[in-house]
Structure formats: structure tokens, C-alpha cells
Image: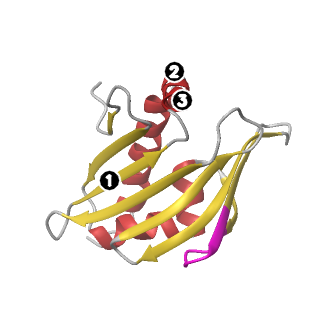
Amino acid sequence: MTQKTKIQAEAGKQELIITREFDLPVALLFKAHVVPELVEQWMGTKVLKLESKPHGSWQYETTNPQGQVVFRANGVIHECIPDQKITRTFQMEDSPFDVQLEFLEFEALTGATSRLTMHQVFRSVALRDQLLQLPFAKGLNWAHDRLQEVVSQLIEH
């Protein structure tokens, strides 16, 4: 199956450019990133905090069936312009990865379709490449597929 989320990793650069087109209006795509209940549904994680405003912060946590934390990430939101962009930091706790800077841009393609472009900047090429050795692309595609599925249910027919 072809992955719809595209990840561009140019040799020698400490960044990733991630793009995905959705069959969703841009307002709903944006909403999926700022409404805690929606984030929880498509990411399959618990939203402990999500302050979608400049100088706001966020924190997500995933636990296993025994209740043990298996993933926790957090950051600061530097810019949040509805239906246009979010600039934030991203840091996985208890991992070898430093904080990353993320620029999320939301673009309307038509009234019913939109594109998300994520520009992630890493501290080094080595850290970016280390992340790419993990099942990162597969996980991101899964999450974006879930986003499409969950948020499509909000569209009134």
C-alpha cells in the first residue's frame, strides 16, 4: 500500500519536509491539531495539555494496557494562526532525541481538500537520520490515515 504522507530528507540537511493532502476542508484539518479530543482520537494518545496560543504548551502521553507510560512528548507553541500555521517545539521525554522545531502549515487546495506541510528542524543530521531508522514514516502515515478517518466524520453530509 502506498503511503500518502510523503517525507523528504535531503542528504546532509538536518531537516525533514513532510507533506500530506487530506480530503478535508482546511478549517477541519487545523481543528484536528488544536482540539484535544480530536488529537486524542486520531493520535491514539492522551492529551495532558494543549494550549493552542502563542507561548502555550502541550503534552501528550501514551500508556500500555498496564498503565505504564510508554511515550510522552511535550513542547511550547510559539505561533498559532487559525487555519494557517502552528510553530512549536517537540521533545520526546526519556529518549536520545533533542528538542525539534516544527513549522506546520495548513493550506486550502479546494473548498473540500487541504494540505499539511510540516518542516521539522533537528539539532543535527545524525539525530534526524537516527529518527528515520525508526518506524517513523509508517507511524506518521498511520496517524494521518486516522486523522482523515476521524475528522471526516465531522463533515455534514
Instruction: Report, in whole angstroms, how far the alpha carbon at label 1 lies from the one at label 3.
Output: 18 Å
125 in relation to 19, above or below = above
Residue 94 coordinates in the image, percent (x, y): 78, 38
Q: Residues within 10 Å of mark 1 (few under 14, many from 20)?
A: some
- Which disc number belongs to residue 117? 1
106 in relation to 27, above or below = above
Instruction: Report, in whole angstroms, how far the alpha carbon at label 1 lies from the one at label 2.
Output: 21 Å
Q: How many labels does the image show?
A: 3
CB within 8 Å, label 3 to label 2: yes
User: Looking at numbered disc 2 in the image, what kind of residue is underneath it?
Assistant: Gln
Which stretch is magenta?
50-58
Q: Is mark 3 on a helix, strand or loop?
A: helix
Residue assigned mark 3: 131
For marks 1 and 2, the one nearer the N-term is 1
Residue assigned mark 2: 133
Image quadrant in which you'd find residue 137: top left
Residue 50 coordinates in the image, percent (x, y): 63, 69
Image quadrant in which you'd find residue 60: bottom right
The answer to whether residue 46 is left or right of residue 42 is right
User: Looking at numbered disc 3 in the image, what kind of residue is underneath it?
Assistant: Leu
User: Looking at numbered disc 1 in the image, what kind of residue is underneath it?
Assistant: Thr
Whether the magenta-drawn stretch holds residue 75 is answered as no
Whether residue 157 is visible: yes
Q: What element carries label 1?
A: strand
